[in-house]
Image (cartoon, rainbow, N blue to C red):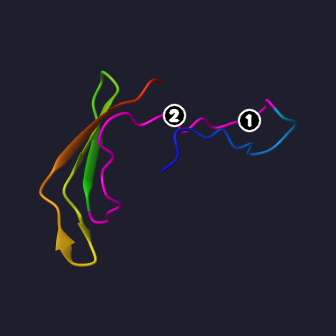
Amino acid sequence: MGDSASPAIGGSPGENQVNFGVVAGMQPDAREGHSADVDADGYMLVFGGDRHHMPFNDMHMYHIKF
């Protein structure tokens, strides 16, 4: 993961861009098979999953600004 990215999706520069934001602190390992939910306050919780048959039993929280 990089610090941030703003790739253009279409149109002229500055239009239709997506900002992937910045992850501060410990970044989780890549995974699949996890569970995730976003609450009403804009927090995304990611729990568990696995990577190459190595199970994770952890939880990460991200604040998503809409």
In the rendered image, residue 22, in percent from the top left (x then y), is placed at 47, 34
Q: Amino acid at mark 1?
A: Asn
Bin the neighbour count of mark 2 within 10 Å (Cα to Cα): few under 14, some 14-19, many 20 and up: few
Q: Residue at x 29, y 42 (%)?
A: 26
The residue most toward the bottom is: 53
Task: Say whether residue 40 is left or right of residue 15.
Answer: left
Residue 44 point in image, percent of width and height = 31, 36
Q: Report the magenta residues as a range.
A: 14-33
**Alpha-carbon distance for marks 1 and 2?**
15 Å
Q: Position of residue 30 (x, y in %)?
A: 35, 61
Q: Nearer the viewer, residue 55 or 44?
A: 55
Mark 1 or 2, nearer chain start? 1
Circle 1 crowding by C-alpha within 10 Å: few under 14, some 14–19, many from 20 = few
Residue 5 placement: quadrant: top right
Image mark count: 2
Q: Amino acid at mark 2?
A: Gly
Q: Check residue 19 for magenta coloring.
A: yes
